[in-house]
Image (cartoon, helix red, strand yellow):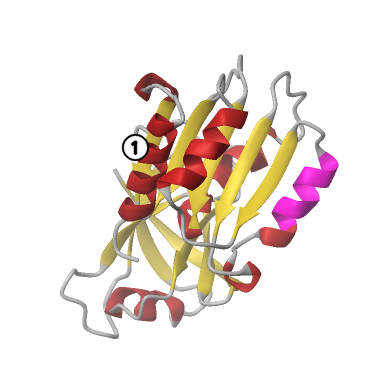
Amino acid sequence: MVFETHITAHKEVAKGTHEVTLGRPTSFVFKAGQYTQVAVPKLTHSDPKGRSRQFSIASSPYDMDEIKVVFRNSGSGFKETLLHTSIGASVQIEQAAGSFLLPQKVTRPQVFVAGGVGIAPLMSYLHQRIDDVWEQPVTLLYGNQNPESAAYLGELQQMSKQHRQFSLDNIYKRPTPGLFAKLAEKHQVAVWWVVGPPGMVSVTVNGLHLGGISADKIMTESFDGY
């Protein structure tokens, strides 16, 4: 199903990283972890991949007014077009899809590993659940080149102060299997959720296996096109 909507806000949320807010159509439904396809009516900058892209939704399913998507400005024709599309302009979105569904009932510790804008689906989940009572701890391992390039860093730091069961650990170095093997030793009973560029996901999963985490405790989502 395709919905007509409009842009309500543009915001830079880190160096080279942008958030676009869209009005949420009444019958648009999604779960934390899912994505939508966003299409502009016409490209103002040519793009061989066309006039649409898939983006994970960064806003809470409980927010009935807005849908937020976030992306690195890679310089593609589509992203340049979207960045320069004015507030109030019409765009189309498709009904949400995706199987990277974050847990609604948490019965054991959870570890989220996000690389770059892989933070988007995790923000959706945290926005949805931050005010809940958590019976199990949630740890976010957030990888970026530096603090300036980390989207939503200030908000995540505030969340970690607000919620005693949520902890944030930033990683500002190239990930290696050895790094995640050591991290796995600290979280042996946790379920791991890994989302980011394909190379980062592969390195993380290899490290977790080396650290003794079984495949059934690792959920992954790879983002292409960075």
For the point 76% across and 31% down, the residue is: 165
Depth check, front residue: 136 or 21? 136
- Image quadrant containing the N terminus: top left
Depth check, front residue: 205 or 74? 205
13 with respect to 6 (left or right): right
Is residue 96 visible in the rendered image? The answer is no
Say above or below: 172 vs 99. below
For the point 53% across and 75% down, the residue is: 87
Residue 214, image x, y percentages: 39, 21
For the point 40% across and 32% down, the residue is: 210
Element class at badge 1: loop
- Please give the residue where the numbered disc 1 appears in the rendered image: 98
Residue 41, image x, y percentages: 29, 71
Badge 1 density bin: few <14, some 14–19, many ≥20, Cα 10 Å:
some
Which residues lie in the magenta part? 155-162
For the point 41% across and 68% down, the residue is: 90
* Residue 158 in magenta stretch: yes
* Residue 120 in magenta stretch: no
Is residue 215 visible in the rendered image? The answer is yes
Depth check, front residue: 135 or 98? 135
Say above or below: 83 vs 112. below
